[in-house]
Amino acid sequence: MDAFSFFEKFPTELSVIEYFIKVRYTDKKEAVCPHCGSVGRTSHRKDMPRVFQCNSCNNSFSVFKDTIFEKSDTDLRKWFYAIHLMLNSKKGISGYQLQREIKVTYKTAWRMLKKIREAMSNEELALFQEISEIDETYVGGKPRKQAKKDRDDDDDMPSSGNKRGRGTNKTPVIGIVNRALNKVVAKVAELNEQGQKLSGKQLIAFIKETVESDSTIYSDEFKGYNQVSKHGYKHEKVDHAREFAYGSVHTNSIESFWAVLKRGIVGIYHHVSTKYLQLYVNEFAFRWNNRDSENLFGLVISGFY
């Protein structure tokens, strides 16, 4: 949906409310009165568009009950336009940019983006089958040259304060792309009990959460994947020191996702704290998984409840 289509679809706040009701209360989903528990006994008040009236107990309640919109003072069209901007930006939109676009405070813009990412995080995927690719990446600042005064006098080579790849101080993220569905699941890897950032047990646990047993897993030569075949999976590896692909065995799809994720973080967000990194990863995964969807906007709205 482009900007012109957005403003044609949502010219007023009433159009936003009616769209939300249509998305939330479809088919067998009926409004439940929070006062008496009656189902399907409500009516939309025309004099107060944000309110449902219960015909059983004669009480009223918000159309946006139990959603972020219920107690928000921010204009509903601004909320919807923020969602539109986030979905149409392949690499995301920063809080400062959203602040300028919809004329709110930075604190409000940041909170809105956080809530939208939480809605995107509610996507549920079935266990992957057939062939899936697994890989890991490391998110954080670019490697910096160590100042000469901080190095040993006999060290003539420039040293990196934060080296690349495995062994870095950056935060690891594990990802799996299913080839049949072209869907991705990615998860931030936290330190285990031994203080390791990325252990074989963590990788196996993530695979079991994401991929159905007896499926095929493609990976690189990282030793953390050595036990995959012992847990009910068919496992094939490609040696990246020699080649990018060994026939159909490669991890190009998951690496394409990493490219979009990293360009977004470096180019748009610049820095993401580990505390909120999973939300940002979920944002990029949601856009990747639903890039061909004709109801992308509705999927995000349904994630709010």
Image (spheres, helix red, strand yellow):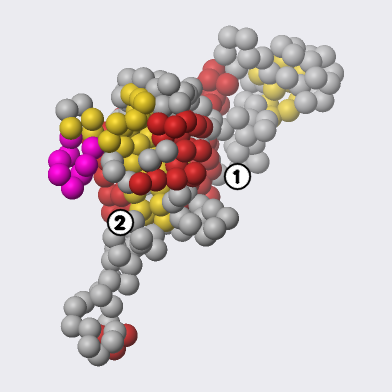
Residue 290 shows in the view: no
Q: Which residue is mark 2?
A: 165
Is 134 on the left-hand or right-hand side of 282? left
Residue count near mark 2 (Cα–Cα under 10 Å), binned few <14, some 14–19, many ≥20 = few
Residue at 74% from the left image edge and 14% from the top image edge = 39
Q: Position of residue 261 (x, y in %)?
A: 33, 45
| 253 part of magenta stretch | no
Q: Name the amino acid, label 1.
A: Asp
Chief secondary structure of the magenta span?
loop
Q: Position of residue 101 (x, y in %)?
A: 38, 48
Is 206 on the left-hand or right-hand side of 6? right
Residue at 35% from the left image edge and 62% from the top image edge = 168
Residue 26 in which image quadrant? top right
Q: Name the amino acid, label 2.
A: Gly
Q: Which residue is mark 1?
A: 73
Q: Residue furthest top?
A: 27
Residue at 58% from the left image edge and 9% from the top image edge = 27
